[in-house]
Amino acid sequence: MATSLIRRQLAVPLQRTLCLRAPGCRFVSKTAAKTHVEFDYDGPSMKTSVPGPRSQELLKQLGEIQNVGAVNFFCNYDDSRGNYLVDVDGNRMLDLYTQISSIPIGYNHPALLKLMANPNNLSTFVNRPALGILPPENFPDKVTESLLSVAPSGMSRVQTMSCGSCSNENAFKSIFIWYRNKERGLSGPTAEDLSSCMLNQAPGCPDLSILSFTGAFHGRTMGCLATTHSKAIHKLDVPSLDWPIAPFPRLQYPLEEFSRENEQEEARCLEEVEDLIVKWRQKGKPVAGIVIEPIQSEGGDNHATADFFRKLRIIAQKHGCGFLVDEVQTGGGGTGKFWAHEHWGMDDPADIVSFSKKLMTGGYFHKDELQADKPYRIFNTWMGDPSKNLFLAEVLNVIRRENLLEEVARSGKALMNGLYELQAQYPGLLSRARGQGTFCAIDVRDAETRERITLQTRDKGVILGGCGEKSIRFRPALIFKEYHVHLFLNIFNDVLAQHK
Amino acid sequence: MATSLIRRQLAVPLQRTLCLRAPGCRFVSKTAAKTHVEFDYDGPSMKTSVPGPRSQELLKQLGEIQNVGAVNFFCNYDDSRGNYLVDVDGNRMLDLYTQISSIPIGYNHPALLKLMANPNNLSTFVNRPALGILPPENFPDKVTESLLSVAPSGMSRVQTMSCGSCSNENAFKSIFIWYRNKERGLSGPTAEDLSSCMLNQAPGCPDLSILSFTGAFHGRTMGCLATTHSKAIHKLDVPSLDWPIAPFPRLQYPLEEFSRENEQEEARCLEEVEDLIVKWRQKGKPVAGIVIEPIQSEGGDNHATADFFRKLRIIAQKHGCGFLVDEVQTGGGGTGKFWAHEHWGMDDPADIVSFSKKLMTGGYFHKDELQADKPYRIFNTWMGDPSKNLFLAEVLNVIRRENLLEEVARSGKALMNGLYELQAQYPGLLSRARGQGTFCAIDVRDAETRERITLQTRDKGVILGGCGEKSIRFRPALIFKEYHVHLFLNIFNDVLAQHK
């Protein structure tokens, strides 16, 4: 029972020495640090193979209802806490994947449980409003206290949505509306605009496009999917739009060691972006907006330099394209800053920034001019969910109170150092270690070995995720401390040793 | 404070005589019935004009953050209960619009508050999982207990999603995947399929289409929006797809009085459907699916007969098109049956049925063959929200325990009788009364008068919604009793009298 966790936390030992699994490994000399996560467990504990017998039983049951091919195992969320996910067979795993990077401050955080116990919050959960027409009294305050307190530079407006895909879909729509209004100037839509759009035809439904990048992932609804190019299985058989796709830089890591090569690669990609903008304008499908992730996540944790993004931003401005930075996976602190785009050091980083996952609610920030000129243009029944704003406000309190962004930077440094060491130790197996904060990744020899290593690591009690063709991505919660880094590195090292 | 409502309910008088506002009105002779809604208020109570001073203050505050052009007023959801929405200025209104038809059993229903007080449910709210990979232990049971217990005929599979648009987007994708797999037969996708789809090109992203109807509303993300044709403001400036749009029958009401004319009109529309399917196949954009609402809601509460839907279903089968029934607004009991398509009396009404709103979670049921053949084809981070399934399970318990579908049928009959009487009384003002259950509508002389009547009715304490060009739609909760019908009719009559 989740409530009992708050009480039980006191029984958890706060300090322990590191598990010395592999006598020859490089991380045994580290002294154990306090976990500083008071509601955490003290380490993984595996009781069965995974999926265990109970998970297999449930897989069979759910298989009668849904395709369960992607289900790893079933979870006991009541007993999960902090950095540890507990499954239905009693296996307790250190979680470096956190529900596809969507759990900000660990499982059953006492602050969130406390929020649930507050009777003043009850009606927010029970009465989900149509936010666009009948918002609750505390909505402006809650949005100000939560989302606006982390608004990207230059943005004071935000629209909540229910999920990441809806956020990007509506961000695209905001860009299209803004772009057409710019074209129209002071005159409103023509009668032909209004009649043709009802039939899906131009000029009312104009032939505008969004420029995206190879390897990008922006969601799976049809508009988003036209800008997603991560894996064929995401796109196969779904009709799409003839929108331009620019190459995302394929950099060499560590970035600072290959600055000359990377600069050339980025210049090549930027040139291609401009060429495509011109080409699509000539084609009669002008590029109304550019969408990009600060770090391509599903597509393989592909980084680009701050210089690349600054130049891309200038290209967008030069050609009158809206600039949408998709922070659905990168936002919320994992990179050591609240937004990954803060690493670019820009006052005016974007026109729109979309978010979801760790922010508990979907949505997007935007500059004033990107606000739709009329009501009901950006609209749906729910327009988000105020109960998620409650959680977010509390998550932000915890992040500030516990200096979690600094902690992430510290853990991230330890994680990167560990990955560099492992990569040096297993040169034929690992390569291209890269990351910001704890938002890190490393490449494995091939896809098959990546799968095997991921499963073997899980069997030893650590959950990892894959991305791209053969990368492992690390997406721990913001409460992942140096202590957990070393715990992970020891176990990972054990697994890698088998593949040497 | 919401929790105190359970205790306070006992103080609410359960019986009262009807308010005799208009001495000459046709509804004063009705004797008052028990409300049977024990946590309800006993009537509207207006203290200020709407939006009142506090709402106006908040409008200004929220206006700094968002476009507030669609906001009616701000609500006090703590104090709202049953059929009554309370605003921040203390105005208490009988709600016949229920957050765009999305509140199933009224505000702060004791059963839902009780659910929140159960500590066993806490972790479901606090730890939102990535359902597609790591579902909670009780997920199969909860889905079985909730959604599967109301599965449409012929369907035993269901996929949850976060909102109505995502539900339809993914239903479209399921249809496209199913359609292409049928075409391929036993062979899998070709290398060309896999490479071309990464570039948004055929054959991997095939030029397939979804046939929709004039006046339809299926959501606002880009795929959905290509099938939405309700109002220009929903579609203007957003690029779309060249998909076929068939005429939705424009029937005369009451349906049974115009059966010959309506039959002709429906035959005309069905013929057009077949013509379009042939035409789009010749165009190289085969119709993979047909999407339709059982009652077009946003588009103006347009009905068609059971015969029309049965014949349309046959056309879909004849041409190998998936048949998607969008029950986002009609589903959940408002028509007096749980699904509006049950009124068609078919064993095999559809291939897919999408839902959201009153079901608290989005999603879609589908026949076995519509399940994607591989994992990760229908996928996103959250894939719904188990906390909403908890609410739905409880809502369904209440519906069964209190025989709410029968109650809706009874209230609906009283509402329709009242609307017929009013329409006879105000022939130049009202026309085309129509409905199933309490899912009713009536047309007003013109759009401007509709707006005025809606606002005047609200000023007297009743919330109504508009739809289509000049219709008023009635979307009360399932706990809307005959007592409330008469309360509404009296107030509505008062307002109409001013327009005679």
Image (cartoon, coloured by chain):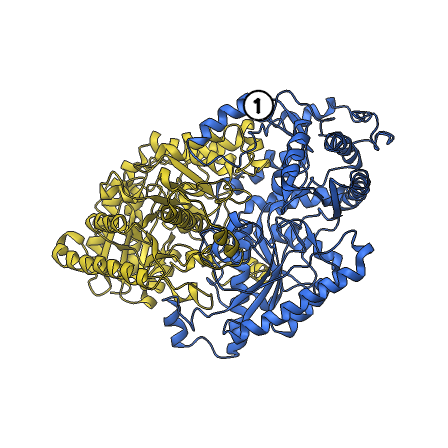
Chain colours: A blue, B yellow
Counting from the top left corner in percent of width and height, residue A73 is at 56, 30
Counting from the top left corner in percent of width and height, residue B183 is at 36, 49
Counting from the top left corner in percent of width and height, residue A124 is at 53, 43
B3 relative to A393, above or below: above
> Which one is nearer the viewer's eye here, A478 or B87?
A478
Residue at the spot x=27%, y=43% of the render? Answer: B349
Locate residue A193 relative to residue A34 in the image: left or right.
Answer: left
Residue at the spot x=63%, y=67% of the render? Answer: A273
Residue A253 in sight: yes
Q: Quadrant of residue B410?
A: top left
Which residue is tagged 1? A52
Residue B24 in sight: no
A475 relative to A456, above or below: below
> Which one is nearer the viewer's eye here, B201 or A18?
B201
> Which one is nearer the viewer's eye here, A388 or A61?
A61
**Few, some or many residues within 10 Å of mark 1 (<14, 14–19, 20+):** some
- Please identify the quadrant where the C terminus of chain A is shown: top right
Outermost bottom residue:
A186
Q: Which amino acid does label 1 sit on?
A: Gly
